[in-house]
Image (spheres, grey):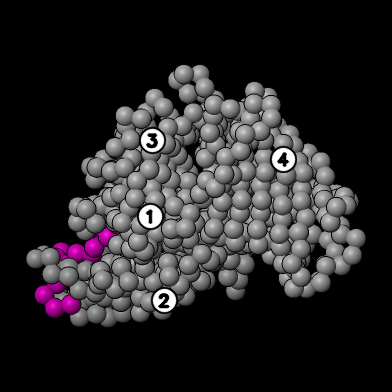
Amino acid sequence: MLSGISASQAQLMKAKEIYTKADSLRGELTPLRTCYDIKYYHLDVKVDIDNKFISGSNLFKFAAVDRFNKLQFDLFDNLSVDKVEYRGKTLPFTREYNAVFVTFPDYIEKGKLDSFTVHYSGNPIQATRAPWDGGFDWKKDSQGKPWVATACQGVGASVWWPNKDHQSDEVDGMLISVAVPNGLMNVSNGRLVKTEKMKGGYTKYHWKVDNPINNYNIALNIADYAHFQETYDGEKGPLSLDYYVLQENKDKIEHLKKNANETLKAFEHWFGPYPFYEDGYKLVETAHLGMEHQSAIAYGNKYKNGYLGSDGSRSGWGLKWDFIVVHESGHEWFGNNITAKDLGDMWIHESFTNYSEALFIDYFYGKEASQAYINGNRRGIQNDIPLQGPYNVNKEGSGDMYNKGGVLHNMIRTMIDDDEKWRSLLRGMNAKFYHQTVDYQDILNYMNEQSGIDLTKVFEQYVQHKSIPTLEIIENSPGVFMIRWISEVENFDMPVHIFDKNGKRQLIKPTSKFKLMRLDGLTKESIGVDTFNYYIGVSIQ
């Protein structure tokens, strides 16, 4: 093993060995990307559904972070860069894989606000398993009318539009203008501010986003939609709730309304105000299962409770609510409000959002029900690779970031053993990192400070390694035990609850070195360990 090297450094070394130049161009923050800070986009695109062809432009407004005369933006190489325009002139550019390098005629000075426009066109990649792969989802509804959506998390927004495709730089605001054939509607993020009749049988929909937004959340949803609207009385006042469903599903709208209202009620309780009041909250029906597109959540769960009618936890609690409404709405707080700077930290998005499902259950059905749901989800954990992926190559970690991540947060809640403190911690996290991008260290530092527990080794074990620790208990004599953790993490320590045969609980604090502990009244036959809430191995001798 790589002695004396941190897990993050080891992962980065591995990434350099096995990943390609294309991966680095997409994932790494080079000076050609950090030299400018995106402030505003205007994406203006026409969708030719018959030919599965798009054409249009994107305006980049930016602030110069450093003095530069060359920068990188991103667009998949199957799409044509027709022209890069700057102050009425065409700029030279080169392409390497999915990166585009633009050279300006003069240096742009540090601190200057400036802009350029990219004109582009082509047939974007067609998603075959949206949302698990990226691109356009070209489908038709039961009436044979077009039903089109985009989904591009992971692969990146540059799969269909030009942008600075890195999660660390969220645009401050955006205008999304989409022209679609007459008789269809486009629904995107934010609020509809204008509808414009175009020549050639097209209508253009202009959607304005007033909050910071990451690139993969920008979405097109094109169909013959029916629109319903209501107002939710939220923590920050009235919040508009909009529902866009296929005409054939208008009679199912009450299912969405019930689930959306209950979800917002539970999550504003646990996490604080919905983070995007200015842009509203929308559920938009799609042919694919779902996606957390900010203020325009893609919904394809077929108006069923559970996950397409099933409960992966087998606890029964997952069948009492619509999984996609709850899970994707949870991402409005974790993923959209708080965004990981690097795809390697996607576990931040998915672990907290997986846990949000349990907190929804907690709010309506109680803590024991939520813990049963979390415990049941363990059946899906693989322990294959770490939750954290390598940095700088646009690579996620293990799919365990969902269920194992949710288990991790339930363990921390159990260690704290103060539910009001736990709620305050979650609300405080969304306030502290409001509309910000974060990394592993940011989350760890916050959790350490607010929990009052040093969780450094816990996060290292559960996020940066694949296995789980084992609690070893050896009885010296009745009531006297030698206890330690066995873990691949050096100097591992974690508080854990034990109990007697009557269920009386106490918190002990083992480390990786044997500790002599006096536990009066307990023997190796009567000592119990809370393996229901702690995802650990146990050896009692």
Please tell me the numbered disc located at residue 239: 1
Tell me if I can see residue 130 in this picture. yes
Front residue of 223/498: it is 223
User: How many residues crowd around disc 1 within 10 Å: few (fewer than 14), some, or many (20 or more)?
Assistant: some
Q: Are marks 1 and 3 in contact (CB under 8 Å)?
A: no
User: How many residues crowd around disc 2 within 10 Å: few (fewer than 14), some, or many (20 or more)?
Assistant: few
Question: Closer to the observer: label 1 or label 2?
Answer: 1
Please tell me the numbered disc located at residue 448: 2
Q: What residue type is labelled 1?
A: Leu
Q: How far apart in space, not on screen, are marks 1 and 2 (Cα)?
A: 34 Å
Query: Which one is earlier in the sequence, the residue at label 4 or at label 2?
Result: 4
Q: Which residue lies furthest to the left in this view?
A: 502
Q: Which amino acid does label 4 sit on?
A: Gly
Q: In this view, does 481 lie above or below 377?
A: below
Q: Quadrant of the N terminus?
A: bottom right
Query: Which one is earlier in the sequence, the residue at label 1 or at label 3?
Result: 1
Question: Closer to the observer: label 3 or label 2?
Answer: 3
Q: Is mark 2 on a helix, strand or loop?
A: helix
Q: Please report the bounds of the magenta region as a residue range.
A: 519-533
Identified at 76% across, 41% down, the residue is: 120
Q: Is mark 1 on a helix, strand or loop?
A: strand
Residue 479 point in image, percent of width and height = 16, 76
Q: What residue type is labelled 2?
A: Asn
Q: How far apart in space, not on screen, are marks 4 and 3 (Cα)?
A: 32 Å
Per the image, the residue denoted by label 4 is: 56
Q: How far apart in space, not on screen, are marks 3 and 2 (Cα)?
A: 37 Å
Front residue of 113/162: it is 113
